[in-house]
Image (cartoon, rainbow, N blue to C red):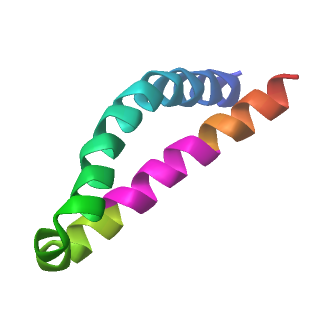
Amino acid sequence: MKKRKWYWRLEILTDRLVPLAVLLLLPIIIIELFFHQTADTYHTIISITDYTILAIFILDLIFKYLRI
């Protein structure tokens, strides 16, 4: 039963993080497209943020797939 509660909480957290991830992705896309110097300077931070957002999206897709 505890495993289901943990799973449910992770699913709810992921559902709440998806809109925030989309909002965080927008400035990253703008920086990558229009401000190349800034993007090069902060490449590591941008990459970590990109992979974190990707992980949130993948988790959300997994939860949606398992629910169907």
Tell me where residue 22 appears, x and y as whole percent. Answer: 40, 35
Give the main secondary structure, helix, strand or loop, of the magenta stretch. Answer: helix
Tell me where residue 61 appears, x and y as whole percent. Answer: 69, 38
Q: Residue furthest right?
A: 68
Which image quadrant for residue 34? bottom left
Does the stretch in magenta take in 39?
no
Tell me where residue 25 appears, x and y as whole percent. Answer: 35, 45
Residue range corresponding to the magenta coloring = 49-58
Question: Can you say whether 19 is above or below 55 in the image?
Answer: above
Tell me where residue 44 appears, x and y as whole percent. Answer: 24, 75
| Left or right: residue 18 compared with residue 35 | right
Residue drawn at x 71%, y 32% is: 63
Q: 39 or 59: nearer the eye?
A: 39
Label count reads 0
Question: Can you say whether 55 is above or below 61 in the image?
Answer: below
Q: 4 or 19: nearer the eye?
A: 19
Q: 34 or 65: nearer the eye?
A: 34
Quarter of the rendering occupied by the N terminus? top right
Quarter of the rendering occupied by the C terminus? top right
Residue drawn at x 61%, y 42% is: 59
